[in-house]
Amino acid sequence: MPAFGPFLAALRAPGVGQALEAYRAGRQARPSEPAIDEETMNRIRVRPAGGKKVRTRSRCSSRTVADHPESWNVFDSLGSLRHGREPALAIQAYERSLQLKPGDTGGAERLKKLRAAAGRD
């Protein structure tokens, strides 16, 4: 798991930005190696330190989407993250989540509210 190792080391030192860059570089150099699983990345995403929470969550979510593009949960989480700041992106994320898991009533309700607020019923 070399792509994962530099990521963890960088998380302990300078922070998530450098950790994500080290991980991205490792994935790019060795694409056949397994990605960090979705659950682990979500745990990292929801526990950022200091005042960098939104940026950190956004970067982790983007990486998780790249590594797990067929996960409804990744897109649901991204929609939740973007909900207040970037409603158009939140709508796109919820739409993709619902394509992957059409029966998600929570995601459907959040999407309905976002569309109504954006005048896109």
Image (spheres, rainbow, N blue to C red):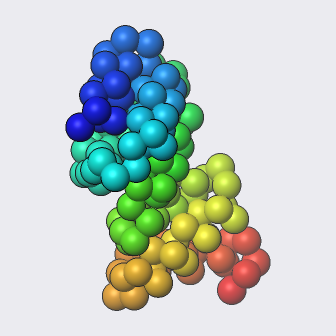
Query: Can you say whether 4 is above or below 9 in the image?
Result: below
Q: Which residue is rendered at x = 51% and y = 62% of the image?
A: 79
Where is residue 93 drawn, in percent x and y? 54, 67
Where residue 41 sits, quadrant-wise, is top left
Please state, as top left, top right, bottom left or bottom right, where the N terminus lies in the image.
Answer: top left
Q: Where is residue 92 in the image (x, y as percent from the top left)?
A: 61, 70
Does residue 101 lie above or below 73 as drawn? below
**Residue 115 spot, x, y in % from top left:** 65, 77
Q: Is residue 47 visible?
A: no
Q: Position of residue 46 (x, y in %)?
A: 35, 40
**Nearer-the-camera pick, 27 or 116:** 27
Between 89 and 119, which is closer to the camera in this rendering? 89
- 102 versus 84 height, above or below: below
> Could you tell me which residue is drawn at 41 percent across and 35 percent down?
26
Q: Which of 17 and 23 is in front in this view?
A: 23
Question: In this rendering, is residue 15 above or below 22?
Answer: above
Q: Which of 58 and 110 is in front in this view?
A: 58
Residue farthest right in this picture: 119
Kindly identify the residue that appears in the image at 40 percent across and 50 percent down. Answer: 31
Quadrant including the C terminus: bottom right
Would residue 105 appear left or right of 93 to someone viewing this image? left
Name the residue located 56 percent from the left edge and 34 percent from the top edge. 55
Total count of labels:
0
Q: Can residue 96 be seen in this view?
A: yes
In the rendered image, the residue lying farthest to the top is 13
Picture quarter containing residue 22?
A: top left
Left or right position of 89 against 17: right
